[in-house]
Image (spheres, rainbow, N blue to C red):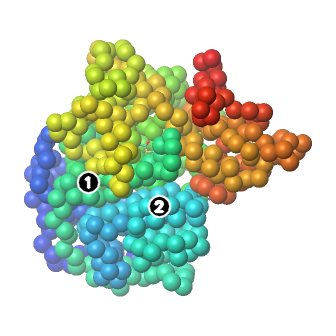
Amino acid sequence: VLWDIHKSCHGFHPAPQRLRCQSLSGAGAPRWNDYDTPEEFNFASDVLDYWTQMETEGKRGPNPALWWVNNQGDEVKWSFREMTDLTRRAANVFTQSCGLQEGDNLALILPRVPEWWLVIVGCIRTGIVFMPGTTQMKAKDILYRLQVSKAKGIVTTDTLAPEVDSVASECPALKTKLLVSDHSRKGWLDFRSLIQSESPVHTCIKSKTLDPMAIFFTSGTTGFPKMAKHSHGLALRSFFPSCRKLLQLKTSDVLWCLSDTGWILAVAGSLLEPWTAGSTVFAHHLPQFDPKVIVQTLFKYPITQCFAAPSVFRMILQQNSTSLRFPTLEHCCTGGEALLPEEQELWRRQTGILLYQAYGQSETGISCGTLRGMKIKPGSMGKAIPPYDIQIIDDKGNILPPNTEGNIGIRIKPTRPIGVFMRYESNPVKTAEVECGDFYNSGDRATVDAQGYFWFLGRADDVINASGYRIGPAEVENALAEHPAVAESAVVSSPDPIRGEVVKAFIVLTPKFLSHDRDQLTKELQQHVKSVTAPYKYPRKVEFVSELPKTITGKIKRSELRKKEFGQM
Ligand code: BCO
């Protein structure tokens, strides 16, 4: 059906609605400045529809807005005009077919399929709050998200639909299940056929800039992931002149961001950043990450910019390819985890292209970066991107002098800058915990030098950052606790040459399993974690111990174990 949509949209003329396009004063020229907070902003009407208008007037080149391929040779190319049409239909699917309303939460668990873009922009048009999640999630992860967010709807594929069905009866708020598939499923609405049958006429809401737009789930040391809620300001921020300098995208650029669709980096790098500039979004739907295919793709398609976590670049370098001189690639940016200076240098030597670092979180989007063309200080993640005022602070919110280790803080008082999350939804305690004097305390440790370049050092808490995934140790420990072999466990970060960090579990066995083969048990426990929670969290390293280090009150001292892993003890 996807291909039918594709065909039906070629040569399709959008409904004769008056496009609201006064927001940009010229092709790609931003109307807003770094510190502006317009009363209203909506990415769909102010940005996407603007580029549709530019296309219609012949003021934008022929590159598609979305260029999607998979490994079976399928291809979708949608122009901005088609995107406007399809996302208006998606908006009508949500409000007309599903009865969803502005402010309702919608769980979005899709792999890299074209409908991912339709759902997000359809939500933005209607004010429905989209909540992206990785397709690696299992039933329990989904149940938690649906319950805590009181989601009214979910969109997913037939791979995950059975997992959703297994928990749906425990989610009283859930009233709409939308399936993206070529097959139908009882109790589910068929998104692809609804898109075809719904009207392309839709009036976009006039969203206030500070109205809610999205929720990103983010892990912490304790408990379940928190819901970082963002306003439409997150999208507006991509528009600000300083943010545009990060990648300096042009309408002729083809940007490939490889982040999983569940993370804020995908929303920024595969949607907001490129479309704000009128560039082409490139996407390759790989069921399983394969660096060989990434290399082939960079040779085959006219991709000019690539944005991915450092682990992706490391895995490409590991390929021993005869050449990594990609014909059209001009600029590479990386973020999500730490990058070593030697890795940056190796990438430059092999590809002839500099690897620029950026830094951000689910709470803040891209906050810091070495802007394109700016001097790279190898190992540094660059400078604060306005309107963010980033300082290194102590635990009380006092600004520390240059070259002093402290917490990365973003000033939120007296004015909370556009782009910083609104709050952890339904969690005022956690929201208050990250406020530190006049700053949002990121929980990341760093230093800043006299020129304003930031240098990442690690987490202040026990959160693990494995190949760009933020993993809460308690989530893994809870999964391990469900296995009869585990008496107790402590999960910490451990260094890894490819993934930067990996999850390591220290496990005390129950008496019954003490005599079991340890290698066999390791595999069984890893498989167990993969089966009860999102597999990216599984412990790649396991060590069996007779006891865990504890405080006098019986609290496990994860930091002691972590320090040992990093040779700091
Ligand atoms: O390594 P194994 O093969 O043992 O296990 C892997 C997968 O094979 C496996 N798996 C995946 N899906 C599964 C499954 N197993 C069972 N059922 C499934 N449905 O589980 C393990 C998953 O680990 P992975 O995803 O780390 O592995 P992979 O495939 O090697 O991918 C490597 C990377 C580098 C592509 C991946 O780790 C990645 O995408 N990392 C980047 C994450 C990212 O985008 N972070 C940015 C977050 S946003 C942010 O930081 C703010 C910045 C503004």
Q: CA distance from mark 2 to mark 1?
A: 19 Å
x, y percent for residue 334: 43, 37
- Taking 239 as reference, is 143 above or below it? below
Q: Residue at x 50, y 51 (%)?
A: 224
Quarter residue 305 falls in: top left
x, y percent for residue 56: 19, 66
Q: Residue at x 53, y 35 (%)?
A: 462
Q: Amino acid at mark 2?
A: Arg
User: Which residue corresponds to mark 2?
Assistant: 145
Say whether residue 380 is visible: no
Nearer-the-camera pick, 236 or 488 = 488
Nearer-the-camera pick, 245 or 178 = 178
Q: Is residue 53 rendered to the left or right of residue 363?
A: left
User: Which residue corresponds to mark 1?
Assistant: 231
**Badge 1: how crowded within 10 Å, few (<14), some, or many (20+)?**
many
For marks 2 and 1 on the same chain, the one whose residue lies earlier in the sequence: 2
**Badge 2: how crowded within 10 Å, few (<14), some, or many (20+)?**
many
Element on which disc 1 rests:
strand
- Taking 187 as reference, is 227 above or below it? above
Element on which disc 2 rests:
helix
Q: Amino acid at mark 1?
A: Ser
